[in-house]
Image (spheres, helix red, strand yellow):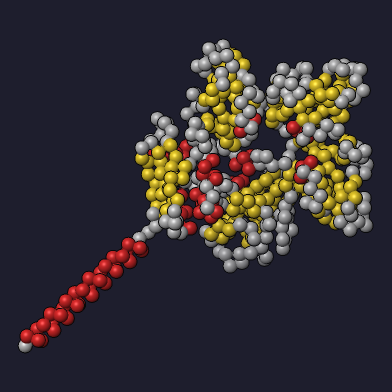
Amino acid sequence: MEINIARVSLKRLLLSCWCTIMLVVALQGQTYAQAPVQKCLVKDGKMFIELSKQISKTALDSFLVKYNLTDVGLKQFFQTQSADSLHQQGWRMEQNNSQVVVFSKPLMSFEHISNPVDRIIFTEKEPESFAGFRAINRGVVFGLNRFKNKKTFPEQDSVVTFYLRQGAQARQVYLAGSFNKWSPTDLAMTKTDSGWIARVPLPPGKHWYKFVLDGDWTIDPDNQLRENDGRGNVNSVFYKTNTIFRLSAFPNAKRVYLAGSFNNWRERDLLMNKTAKGWELPLYLAEGTHIYKYIVDGQWHHEPGKTETVPDGQNGLNSMLRIGEPHLFQLNCYTNAKEVLLAGSFNNWRDFELVMKKTPTGWELPYAIRPGNYEYKFKVDGKWVLDPANPLKVGKDGKDRNSYLILSPNYTFRLRGYEKAKAAYVTGDFNNWDPTALLMKREGNDWVFSVHLPVGKNRYKFVVDGEWIIDPANKLWEQNEHGTGNSIIWVE
């Protein structure tokens, strides 16, 4: 009887131990089954983002939308493990291991913003009326569409017909892009016998787009042009063209390429299309003056019969195309000079190209360039001279000094509270952060300077008597890699 009782007690003890072990294992399983870390909090004047390295794409998207962090660049970090875009926005990596990554960024003091998330995002937000089209086209000089399995989208006047070849089983397809603020339900596409179409009026230039099939976003599978927007999103790219290069000569040529200043003279980049009348290639070209040639079976030719040509520096000629209104460069002196040339940052300082025309009072040349800030000089009988009629100069004293043209200024910087300063400069992205290029002028007790700023986000600072400062009158700023901050202006 005692033996039986002992056996029963042993069985109960073993059963109890087994249950305890299973409970511990279950609890550990629950621990490991918990959702990946997703934290967004404000502490000690900073905003912290903590994310698990095991977070799923869907969970990450939900987190970014929840905290309005889609513009921060976290998607790109998880795709490439590169934090460059985050660092450029002033974020600092506090921790990065196999389990989690933690980023932080100092909060700005904006009294009128109560939401801590909005405080950190404030400097990244574009104004409500910001024209995304113009921002995307910032710095774009030319564009060529590249499709496979279908021709480029048809254009008639200003209307482009977008075409999706796939999606036969989809119930509803929408077109979304930079041209409609990425609305997923505004532009419904019409089903045809071979796909879906939508007609959209577009201005010339570069446009991003995607298709939305039954709620799922997708790039155009037939479009070879794809671009990351810097926020982890890949979009299809379409250029609304405004120029067609046509070459009727050389109908028997095997291959013809186009090369010019707009594509840095790359020889095998722009292959022209053979037509019944010769060769042609539609392109988007930005406002300005464009120099070009054709490469016919390996031989370079300027366009036959083209009235506007410029020297190519090799005893030949290049063709020239102007888009937009020209700016008239004038040098009202040196009437006895034999030759005067114009060169500057607008033509990569090609000092053989722009030959000025003689006038009764000097020399002049109309030259189309788009609004911006440019350095330039005249070359008189082989000697470089500054523009005597332009008081604005940049660079160090001596031969490195250039005249400075601000074409169509669209913003005036104003610095108050430094009336006793001896000198104040403005510097930023727009002049490659040169601290002594743009000397501000006194206007009463203020320092002012007007400049052309490109569309989008512009960072800047003032340099007062050698000291770098952010704009005390502008509460919009972001942290930089030096920990000293940069002021920010959004230009629409």
Residue 404 horizontal/vertical position (percent): 71, 24
Asked if residue 492 lies left or right of residue 33, the reply is right
Q: Between residues 476 and 179, which one lies in front from this camera angle? A: 476
Residue 234 horizontal/vertical position (percent): 59, 53
Q: Quadrant of the C terminus?
A: top right
- Identify the residue at image location x=61%, y=57%: 219
Q: Among all residues in the image, which is located at the extreme bottom? A: 1
- Height in image: 492 above or below 24? above
- Does residue 265 show up? yes
- Identify the residue at image location x=22%, y=70%: 20
Q: Between residues 437 and 270, which one lies in front from this camera angle? A: 437
- Does residue 325 show up? no
Residue 70 horizontal/vertical position (percent): 49, 47
Residue 89 horizontal/vertical position (percent): 52, 40
Q: Between residues 31 and 223, which one lies in front from this camera angle? A: 31
Q: Among all residues in the image, which is located at the extreme left? A: 1
Asked if residue 365 lies left or right of residue 117, the reply is right
Q: Quadrant of the N terminus?
A: bottom left
- Identify the residue at image location x=74%, y=25%: 400
| Quadrant hosting residue 54 | bottom left
